[in-house]
Image (spheres, helix red, strand yellow):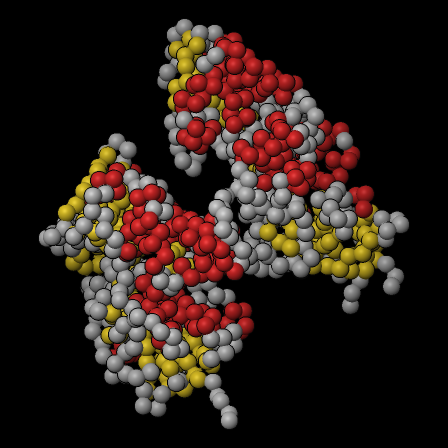
Amino acid sequence: MTTKLLVANLSEIDVKGSRRIKIQDIEIAVFRLTDGSVLAVENKCPHKGGLLSEGMVCGTAVHCPLHDRKIDLRSGKVYEPDDGCVTTFETEIDSESGSIYVTI
Amino acid sequence: MTTSKKKLVLIGNGMAGVRAIEHLLKLSPEGYDITIFGSEPHPNYNRIMLSSVLVGGADLQEIVINDWEWYRENNITLHTGHKITKIDSDRKKVISHLGIEADYDTLIIATGSNPFMLPLPGADKEGVIGFRDIKDCEIMMDTAKKYKKAVVIGGGLLGLEAARGLLHLGMEVHVVHIHNHLMDRQLDEAASRMLQRDLEAQGMQFLLNKHTAAIKGKRRVTGLAFTDGTEVDGDLVVMAVGIRPNIELARAAGIEVNRGIVINDFMQTSVPDIYAVGECAEHRGISYGLVAPLYEQGAVMVKHLLGVETAGYAGSVTSTKLKVSGVNVFSAGRFADAPGTRALKIQDDLAGTYKKIVIQDGKLVGAVLFGDTADGAELFASIKSGESIAGREKEILLGISSDLLGQASSGNSRLESMPDDEIICGCNGVSKGDIGDAILNKGCNTVGAIKACTKASASCGGCKPIVEGLLHLFAGDAVGEPVKEGICGCTTHTRDEIVAEITRMGLNTTKEVMNVLGWINPEGCTKCRPALNYYLGMINPEEYVDEKESRVTNERFHGNIQKDGTYSVVPRIYGGVTSPADLKRIAEVAEKYDVPMVKFTGGQRLDLLGVKKEDLPKMWADLDMPSGHAYGKTLRTVKTCVGSTFCRFGTQDAIGMGIKLEKAFEGLNAPAKVKLAVSGCPRNCAESTIKDFGVVAIDGGWELHVGGNGGIKVRETDLLCIVKTEEEVMEWSSSFLQLYRENAQWNERTAQWIERVGLDYVKKGLENPEDRLALKARIDKTLSLTTDPWKQIVETDELRKNFEQLNSAQPVQL
């Protein structure tokens, strides 16, 4: 069963920034990109478990702060030549209120 | 007509066999039904990297080449933990020890080799192992936790790598070798002695000219006895005396074997439809134990299988590089002084370098390098090409310029005529064809891009010059313009071009720079964005608004991120001088926030480690001390000795001078971290001569040293000048640091910068008093604009929110 949750307001996340939230034992990193979109992934690099929320956001990718693995936030896939994948979560923004919803 | 696919069975799930299968899948994705049997319970992994696993550079996960998923995706039936016990070549099938049978149309034997275990009395005791697979590594790691002493039998490549790994695991290591010099198969005596000296300095102990007579101990090994009556203690014995091709299975099936399974130039054995590749095979009397030849064999075999024309495999010239940290050794071809050969040598015992080249009939046939192995790839390529070097021998000995071997006519034609399946990167098995494909079809136009796409030059980096040569060869034709390497994969512009354009066009944000200069990735990467952020701030300190989102993690959160996502807190302690009141406060904060570890740093300060991110601003507020900037590309610390304040040898006030410098340069943004030190006399207790800017007091003045480094590559400082007064120390240190700030590449330490531009450039830039004052005025301007980042975050809600977790997740009715 999926649940939709109100997790934050746009104003709480900087552009090219991220905030963390724990939902049912899963830590999720919620990113706000330059193009205005908001994406959410499990906050754990598939390489050594680095916190992706702490990494640098470039375009639609985040670089893990530990060993610079580059991860596409839309698909969750690690860029070549490395491999791996993180879980992604569906997001939604209410354009009027700025409310951010994550579905898990 | 029904066409059923041909059945191919591979015995051996190792590097050589699986590599050949990869090659086959590339050329004929649907051609075969493939079944692989492997006796180890793992997918295919990179055996070469086992020594890196031992020294902690890689974990077992990371050395897997093809994961389980790969086998599934390619519809390969994989049986791991299965040993094939019989090949029935009449009925064309194989049988495993667990009773699985598989029919084949084509069979490939790639059973590899086993470590040769000396048939000594006691060789079956617990604690006696080889060094071959993951299991051996695991035994070594476990043994190191319980026991102290290890003995490695065999002073060859593998033995030394095993020994280094065991040293790293904290064991005392003796290496036993039957010859009087180490690595005698790869090195001549001169290079070998230099190697021995370096390894002894790392703590390895050697027992040369020793023949083992027996292994001592009851159930478990306790040591070795030698034929000369001496003994050595050991709780672990690793035999690394060579490999023995695994041929029993083939022999039992009636296949012709010698030392290895005998194969022809197309890897065919004496029995039809049965091939052999890799360490188990013997080609023209040679069994290869290195990876590049095995890959070459596999490539030829696959072509032959598919009916693609191939000239056949004619044997390989091999090169080796020892994978032992801190020691550079390279050897290729026939390096020994044999009749008919002539050798040229240079030995420099001061620098610890040695180079020998061996020539026969005007051609390079072998080389040995020690200390500096940068020329290895070029020399190896020349050996393989068989080109004439007549008349150029001495130039080659004294250092090959790319004109001589790389891009000049002979070099280019050599790269052109090189066959596509020749392995360029031996570490990752990347062929010339793979690199060509990356350049021509995947849009790679820099060495970095090729590295990212194929992994060529990603491990030891020895093949980088050849990759560069291939880039020019392929891209030159296809792109029609020279390809140059920019500061990262996002741009072709160099640091100097970028800085010049920022100045010329008055660019003021990273986005503007990327737009105007045509960045490939619109928002850059973790290399260029922080670099641009630094250059913009350096050029225009007053107007540029620092982009925190373009700073690396540590600089964004003003602490060092640890592997578990916690941070560290290092408050500033000027010159390493603290007070009881400050110490009490630090102790109270550490207790209040349950800090898991409090540690002294190497820079005379205190590190509070393992701090939860959300506690950082609160701790900074409670500490009420400035940030020590222990995490940034900025001034870290000024280390001092006691100096004339207390020390009976001190000639000047080192502490006072250090504090003055630290207060002056605190918070300075720089291309890389900057470390300073002040010693009160030439005894140099503050280690000033391995600092970026080091001050050593002498009677009546100060020596100023620059460009030292105590990190990855230790570099002693160069003496810049000697001055008399404290004011002069400030003037020279300010102008030196500003010259560095304005000219170095981002992430380039002063040591690398000075190596690149030369000390004379620095001296010239600082020799005129007017120039020094102008530089000092510019750095003073920048310094006047710095603020304490911790205080700023503590006082600003908008910044502080990024340290806290979001806490309200409210379910929404759907």
Quarter of the image for residue B195 reads top left
Q: Does residue B633 sit above or below B250 in this rendering?
A: above
> Residue, x 44% and y 18% (percent of image)?
B764
Quadrant housing residue B105: bottom left
Q: How far from the left and from the top, in percent, is residue B619?
A: 68, 32
Residue occupying the point 35% across, 51% down: B412
Residue at 65%, 51% in the rendered image: A61
Q: Position of residue B795 (x, y in %)?
A: 76, 29
Seen as rendered, the residue at the extreme bottom is: B1
Q: Nearer the viewer, residue B104 or B629?
A: B104
Q: x and y percent of residue B546 in the render?
A: 68, 32
Left or right of B29? Residue A8 is right
Q: Judge whether B384 appears above or below B66 on screen.
A: above
Looking at the image, residue B201 sits to the left or right of residue B760; the answer is left
> Can you name the residue that lies furthest to the left here?
B339
What quarter of the picture does the C terminus of chain B occupy?
bottom right
Q: Is residue B732 visible?
A: yes
Q: Residue at point 33% right, 43% down?
A: B403
Query: Quadrant location of residue B665?
Result: top right
